Image: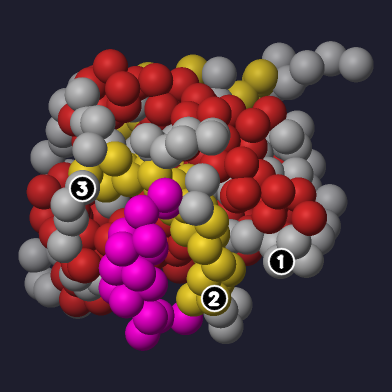
Amino acid sequence: MSRWNLLIVDDEPLNLEIIQEFLEDGPYHMQMAENGAIAWEMLNHSETTFDLVILDRMMPVMDGMELLRHMKAEPRFADIPVIMQTAASSSEQIREGMAAGCYYYLTKPYKSTALIGVVHAVLEEQRAKRQLTEETRILPEPPAISNAEYVFTTLEQAHKLSVMLAATCPEPALAAMGLIELLINAVEHGNLGISYAEKTRLKQEDQWQSEVERRLQLPEYRDKKATVQFNRNEHEVVFTITDEGTGFDAGQYLEFDPARAFDPNGRGIAMAGKLAFSRIEYRGKGNQVIATIPIKKT
């Protein structure tokens, strides 16, 4: 996509000017709204299809939470990601926003790098989601297998395996989105040892993918492999993903945590569980995960 369409919603004209200035050098076409009511009219009647909404929480006429609830209740807009910018950053308020469907936050005032970093991260996720949806839409008939094991080492291989294995699932697009999160996690955090804090910094600096590629060439990492085992029966599809890393405390990442709401990363495993899998279980030291998708009988 050459340009992204952004809807910026804030009742302070100065804030609108600042956001526009921060993002003016990026591949963005921005439209502005002074409150949620105007933004809702624009969503419904504009010829533009918006890719992202940057939304102020506290506004007159219609505030950010009300607009967010309207969007998530309307199928046409439910999949548009929302970044909530707010001075109200308590855990309860963030949980309220998450429950309504917002998983990205900026606390006012923020630096240009914080805004650019989270916008880039959200839109990159949106691009990847659309690519997976398109690739799974044109998948051939899945192979008639019930058990298999595959080895992967790179992000590209993780992507291809996610799409191929998703073809065996009842809802391929959702399965692919969940699988790619777990397979990428095995490469970056597992085999390459990129910590959560390191990924946050790399995402903010737009250096994550280049750092992954760099580490894949280093002697201490280049021979490490990850595997995904596939098992299907009449009741469920089970994926077992194992890496050669030192493991991690996976429990804290299985649910959305308000403490991570302001980071550009940290949602992948929770999103995988929410979107694709009925169960995610990490075993041992955290370098093996079992994800299950039920097969509903018709």
Q: Residue at x 19, y 76 (%)?
A: 214
Which residue range is magenta in the image?
10-27
| Mark positioned earlier in the residue sequence (3 or 1) | 1
Q: Disc 1 to disc 2, how far (Cα)?
A: 10 Å
Res 19 seen here = no
| Mark positioned earlier in the residue sequence (1 or 2) | 2
Whether residue 5 appears in magenta in the rendering, the answer is no
Q: Main secondary structure of the magenta part?
A: helix
Residue denoted by label 3: 108
Residue denoted by label 2: 29
Q: Is residue 87 left or right of residue 294?
A: left
The location of residue 8, given as percent across then percent down, is: 47, 58
Whether residue 11 appears in magenta in the rendering, the answer is yes
Question: Mark 1 near mark 2, Cβ–Cβ under 8 Å?
Answer: yes
Residue 116 lies in quadrant: bottom left
Residue denoted by label 1: 48
Q: Considering the numbered disc 1 on the image, is that residue within a helix, a strand or a loop? A: loop
The location of residue 283, given as percent across then percent down, is: 28, 21
Q: Is residue 204 above or below residue 10?
A: below
The location of residue 49, given as percent across then percent down, is: 70, 62
Q: Amino acid at mark 3?
A: Lys
Give 219 or 281, whichever is nearer the viewer.
281
Q: Amino acid at mark 2?
A: His
